[in-house]
Image (cartoon, rainbow, N blue to C red):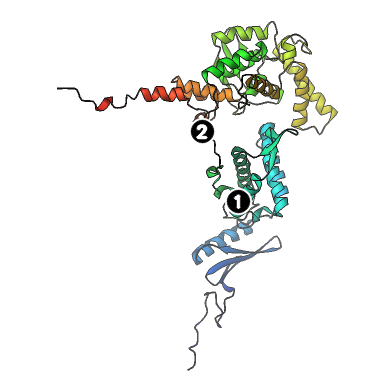
Amino acid sequence: MARKARGPSGHTGQTQAGNVRDVKVERIGPVTIYKRGLSYFLYYREKGVSHRTKVDGNLAVARATASTVSSALANHRPSPLSHQRTSPQEMVAAFLDYVSSVQKLALSTHDRYRAALDRFLDFCKHGGIAVVDTVDETTVENFVRWLRGQTRTRNGSAKGKRGAYMLGGVKFVLSTCRTAFNWASRRRMLPPFTENPFRSFPIDKLRDRVEETGESRLFSAAQERAFFKACSDWQRAMFVSLAAYGLRVRELTHLLVEDVDLEAGVIEIRSKPELYWNVKSRRRRKLPLLPEMRGLLMQLIGGRKSGFVFLNEEFYLGVRHPASDFASPQTFKAHLQKIAANAVVTNPDATERDLRRAITTFCRTMGQIPEKRIRLEFMKVTETIGCPEFTRAHDFRHFFASRAQEAGMNPLLVQDLLGHATMDMTRRYTHFGLEAMREALGKLNPGKATEETPA
């Protein structure tokens, strides 16, 4: 019996013979809609290059998308469906340039991003990834496996003992890649309408076999007493100040004489462009001068009219003296500006990093304490009292937040004192000790609410 003849193929995605192939549906401006099987595709040329893009949807979606592309091409704008195939090296270089030149983030933040993205570039070289638009969630999973097998020195030091990445380090690398890929997507380096693979990957759900118990990095009362008892006078001045206000270490090392108003009883924490340094959150804040801190700061400042409040040990002990004695904060600031100007004259191509290096070199001669020195001194003391697990002076900031909450201080006030941009960050800094939990549970009076009074 003869097979019944097929009707017109229309745009079924099949030829009259029944074969699957591209079948032209219609043309909207320079864009042609084709159907292959059950899927629709758009064909068009942009800057002499042919593009064939699949449309996720029915014919109505294909027509709407074709109209959008046609309008963009007619107005000499890039097609919303196009993207520029970019190598990982090109993407990372462009993103870091954006971070430093457009966002103007702190150089320390730039360095942390660069260190994290260098690991991604190492992985791409290892895995033969030539363009970023081939990275998918499976690639991210392989990246995590690769990262967990790598070693690094702590804090990015060029020398030192190497160890495996801790969970926090892995998460930071992945979150930095997520930020970079978000930026790359907006710059049309990734295919349109595709999800950032680092966003779809569950970074926050990563775990270690031996997880942190959540135990806070807080001194016990006995450890706190032992720590300050083991400090020298110079060390105690630094660490008492960090603990009293929850200062960031760099806020302490960049505190200038004019930031302390003894008459008004105020300490001002602010960014200092002349030093090429900014407060991390860019939030200017004033802190009340505590009675016990007043005498300490008066002793540290002495008769000086300018310069740094906290001086390096050899300057504190009088073994060395600041390179210059400026009569006022204005003359000190003018000298810093002159150093930067001379650096530009010497090297017209000097970057912000070069200028900061020149300023830092001079500040060291004025007695400014290097941030690394404070960390080393902190570790010396904790080693002395038998607590080598405490390695960061930054933990005083966690210590302050936790004690403030235990004392019942308003969380908004704690946020302002710490200079946090969000309450969520303040929450992350707050850890309650066992004694605070015991006291809180004791106030619940378990069982007493259900006791009946005898008749």
Quadrant for residue 72, please give it: bottom right
Horizontal and vertical percent position of residue 314: 75, 13
Tell me the CA gap for discs 1 and 2.
26 Å
Mark carried by residue 141 = 1
Label 2 crowd (10 A; few <14 / some 14-19 / many >=20): few
Q: Nearer the viewer, residue 146 or 101?
A: 146
Q: Nearer the viewer, residue 100 or 453?
A: 453
Residue type, numbered disc 2: Gly
Q: Nearer the viewer, residue 412 or 247?
A: 247
Specify the farthest residue to the right.
346
Horizontal and vertical percent position of residue 358: 78, 25
Which residue is under mark 2? 214
Q: In the picture provided, is 393 more to the left or to the right than 452? A: right
Quadrant for residue 225, please give it: top right
Can I make out residue 85 in this image? yes
Can I make out residue 286 in this image? no
Q: In the picture provided, is 207 more to the left or to the right than 133? A: left
**Are the two marked residues, 1 and 2, in contact with CB atoms closer than 8 angstroms?**
no
Horizontal and vertical percent position of residue 327: 73, 9
SS category of the residue bearing label 2: loop
SS category of the residue bearing label 1: helix
Horizontal and vertical percent position of residue 39: 54, 68
| Residue 48 vertical position relative to residue 378 in the rendered view, above or below | below
Mark carried by residue 110 = none
Residue type, numbered disc 1: Glu
